[in-house]
């Protein structure tokens, strides 16, 4: 993944991009929601 330290698109704060395959979506999204520590996903 990549860190975006400057505003990019709709994100006005730093953000992190990573890609994953569609088969991981049902597992990855709930995990991110439970472990986001208040960050938006």
Image (spheres, rainbow, N blue to C red):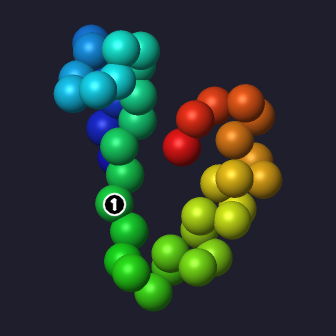
Q: Residue furthest bottom?
A: 23
Front-most of 12 and 28? 12
The reply, left or right, for residue 20 in relation to residue 40 is: left
- The location of residue 27, given as percent across then percent down, is 63, 76
Q: How many marks?
A: 1
Name the image quarter holding residue 3: top left
In the displayed structure, 6 sits above or below 4; it is above
Q: Does dot 1 land on a helix, a strand or a loop?
A: loop
**Is residue 11 toward the left or the right of residue 35 in the image?**
left
Badge 1: residue crowd in 10 Å (few <14, some 14–19, many ≥20):
few
The residue that appears at 59% across and 68% down in the rendered structure is 28
For residue 14, side relative to residue 9 (left or right): right
Question: Percent position (x, y) of residue 33?
Answer: 69, 53
Which residue is nearer to you in this view: 25 or 16?
25
| Image: 8 above or below 41 | above
Furthest residue toward front: 10
Label 1 sits on residue: 19
Q: Quadrant of the C terminus?
A: top right
Q: Is residue 10 above or below residue 24?
A: above
Q: Residue at (34%, 60%) from the top-left corner? A: 19
Q: As displayed, is residue 7 above or below residue 19? A: above
The quarter of the displayed image where residue 22 is located: bottom left
Whole-percent x, y for residue 38 in the image: 73, 30
- Residue at position x 35%, y 43% from top? 17
Across and down, in percent, residue 15 comes to: 41, 28
């Amino acid at each position: 993944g990549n860190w975006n330290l400057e505003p990019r698109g709709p994100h006005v704060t730093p953000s992190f991009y990573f890609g994953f395959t569609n088969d991981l979506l049902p597992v990855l999204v709930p995990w991110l929601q439970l472990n986001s520590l208040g960050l938006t996903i």
